[in-house]
Amino acid sequence: MTGASPGAPLANDSLENDMNGDTAQQDEGRPRVVILGAGFAGLSAALALARHPVDVVVVDRHNYHLFQPLLYQVATAALSPADIAAPIRGIVGRFPNCSVLLDSIAGVDRQAREVLTERGRRVGYDHLIVATGATHNYFGNDHWREAAPGLKRIEDATELRRRILMAFELAEMEEDPDERDALMTFVVVGGGPTGVEMAGALAELARYTLARDFRHIRPEGTRVVLVDANDRLLRMFPERLSRKAARALTKIGVELVMNCRVDGIDQHSVSLGERRINTRTVVWSAGVKASDAGKWLGVETDRSGRVPVDPFLRLEGDPRVYVIGDVASHQSTAGKVTPGLAPAAKQMGLYVARAIARHARGRPLGAPFRYRDMGQLATIGRHSAICDFGRVTVSGYPGWWLWGGAHIYFLIGFRNRLVVAANWFWSYLTFGRGIRLITGDIGAKGLRGRNDKVGDEVLEAAAEEGRGQIYKSVPGAVPGAGRFPGTGTAVPGRAVPERANAVSRSQ
Ligand SMILES: Cc1cc2nc3c(=O)[nH]c(=O)nc-3n(C[C@H](O)[C@H](O)[C@H](O)COP(=O)(O)OP(=O)(O)OC[C@H]3O[C@@H](n4cnc5c(N)ncnc54)[C@H](O)[C@@H]3O)c2cc1C
């Protein structure tokens, strides 16, 4: 264990001393394990180590653990963010040898055996577990990010929910049929599990949940387009199950565009070679790349930014550093690549916890890590899923129940499990999506979204051109108050002084 760090800005602070110095370890003679990231991998390592004679420090930039597989349900208003996240302190807080640090990783000084954080802390370690996961990969087109957000964080899901629900609200007020069609066209890029789940949930949101909510549009006529560069969806599944998934998606109204590479996403459309789809809402689920761990550790990574590890999940040449979960590039001794999935991340976390516990007891390392494939699942709306367990496959309705049971079982925290189960059941019975909340600034941001050229200038420009409803940031203004498209009738809502707020096209 390293000594107290000179870089600590709050040298007298007790937490700081505890984090930087050797107090706990020297007093009790216990090694300190620092875990970067409280995702599936980091958390499973922390929970397993909590029962061993080591001190554990978990560092994460969020104060919650996120169940990413259900993010798409937050984005499509089926679940609320708190249903799929649990505070990290609430999970590990009951173990006295575990502490939590809310901070972002800025680097790792492997010589000094210290982690550097963005708040300027230096956290010494005896063993380091790097488990900071992955992020979206736009394959060199990072400028698409704003137009086509991905799903990785809670903020992504609530932002997508806002964009999706706002698109329907704006379509309801829109008179121009082309613009209305663009607002009611949703494009999902990437036909992996997230893209398939997102497209299915979007189609069902429009067809069932929103069907009766509007007066001037027919949400069930919404166009959901799923684009993929390959010739089939869900390539990690057997071809037969891919075909089933494609049929189930088509049945609920999703348009599949296969063998097509997206080569442009702009404010108003998605381009696929010669073809253009006019849309105001795009979801990106076409790829992931690892977090910056390679940079922090100063090592070469693979093409996806993942850090190569040895058969024991250690950094080559540095046995005190383990890299696990989505950020690790691991191959079994038979050459099989360990997939970026939650069960793999959990198994890795458990494995390194055991390895460190053995080390602490002076025992040899044990066998190399071996990923146990528990099968794969993907759902398509409320009635269908495909589950591949190798020799056994389940699909359709039974698959959906299996998928639901597995996800509830794996949700962290008893409360979340109960709430998610109850929400699903209720929404299943009623076709309702109770969390249809538009959060954020609907007056300005909602209209700007990613697509509207941005801001009040644009709205003002539109006013000058004499087109469109014009909503200015007038205190108390209700967007849409005034005349309603096509009706010529006043819409209930607080009237806005003078003509600053709403001018209908028919005027
Ligand atoms: C939308 C979506 C759907 C998915 N669906 C499935 C599915 O159905 N089944 C399945 O098995 N897998 C699924 N996955 C993949 C699965 O979620 C990942 O394989 C798993 O989360 C990897 O775990 P991890 O611990 O490596 O990383 P993560 O769970 O991503 O955790 C990384 C942690 O590191 C923290 N972190 C990152 N950078 C920093 C930093 N600089 N400083 C501090 N903290 C940092 C993050 O806040 C996070 O808590 C899905 C993923 C997504 C995004």
Image: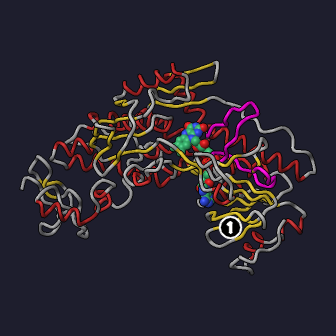
Any atom of ligand 1 within 8 Å of the CB at mark 1?
A: no
Q: Which amino acid, mark 1?
A: Leu
At a point 73% along the width and 73% down the height, the residue shown is 16
Please state the total of marks drawn on the protein image.
1
Sort mark 1 into few (<14), some (14-19) or many (20+) by Cα contacts within 10 Å.
Answer: many
| SS for callout 1 | strand
At a point 72% along the width and 35% down the height, the residue shown is 371
The correct choice, above or below, for 271 with respect to 389 in the image is below
Residue occupied by mark 1: 116
Q: Farthest residue in the left direction? A: 507
Q: Is residue 417 visible?
A: no
Return the x and y of residue 499 as percentages of the image width and height.
12, 66
Q: Is 153 situated left or right of 60 in this image?
A: left
Return the x and y of residue 412 as percentages of the image width and height.
63, 46
Quarter that holds the N terminus: bottom right
Quarter that holds the C terminus: bottom left
Q: Is 261 situated left or right of 10 in this image?
A: left
Q: Farthest residue in the bottom direction? A: 12
Return the x and y of residue 151 as percentages of the image width and height.
48, 47
Q: Is residue 190 visible?
A: yes
Which is nearer the eye, 221 or 278? Answer: 278
Return the x and y of residue 250 as percentages of the image width and height.
37, 26
Which range of residues does the magenta coloring cover?
Answer: 316-340
